[in-house]
Amino acid sequence: MVPLTPLESEVLGLMSWDSYHLGEIVSVVRGADPLHDDFGVYRTLVALLESWIARGWLTLASRPTFPTVLPSVEQVVPYLEQYGVQAIAEESDIALPELELTEQAFRDVEWLRGVV
């Protein structure tokens, strides 16, 4: 069984049903610790993304609501790093990609197997 933080479990549960815009994931991260400033939210988000991308759990949405300029999910973190904390600021107008879980996430996380 893959050990998960409560935040990871929450995001996985939400994403198990549908793709999620990265801005929506930012909102979940922000809500998990309302005392975090934008820098704390950014660090937590990037750590989560790096971990899940390395595990093969994320991909760009196959049918995004809005087109993305990114060629692959591996470009998400470098894209965020290009803008820094401004990318996730509440007043930001930077276009963020839409992501979805891969089959690997459903294989690795036992309780996800029964979700869909």
Image (cartoon, rainbow, N blue to C red):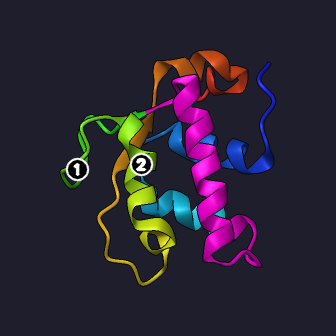
Q: Residue at x 48, y 80 (%)?
A: 90
Residue 48 vs residue 5, the one in the foreground: 48
**Does the magenta run of residues contain 59?**
no
**Residue 55 location (% of width, % of height):** 58, 24
Left or right relative to 55: residue 111? right
Local crowd size for mark 2, using a 10 Å CA cut-off: few (<14), some (14–19), many (≥20) = few
Look at mark 2 in the image and give the residue it sits on.
78
Above or below for 116 versus 45: above
Q: Marks 2 and 1, Cα distance to the nearest angstrom?
A: 14 Å
Q: Mark 2 vs mark 1: give the one in front.
A: 2
Left or right relative to 73: residue 103? right
**Residue 75 location (% of width, % of height):** 36, 41
Look at mark 1 in the image and give the residue it sits on.
68
The disc labelled 2 sits on which kind of residue? Pro
Quarter of the image for the N terminus: give it. Answer: top right
Work out which residue is located at the far bottom of the displayed protein and give it.
91
Above or below for 38 versus 84: below
Label 2: which secondary element:
helix
Label 1: which secondary element:
loop
Q: Residue at x 53, y 18 (%)?
A: 104
Local crowd size for mark 1, using a 10 Å CA cut-off: few (<14), some (14–19), many (≥20) = some
Q: Main secondary structure of the magenta part?
A: helix
Q: Earlier in the sequence, mark 2 or mark 1?
A: 1
Residue 76 seen in this snapshot: yes
Residue 19 seen in this snapshot: no
**Residue 11 location (% of width, % of height):** 61, 48
Left or right relative to 68: residue 1? right
Quadrant for residue 61, please give it.
top left
**Residue 31 location (% of width, % of height):** 67, 69
Q: Which residues are magenta?
A: 31-58
Above or below for 65 versus 19: below
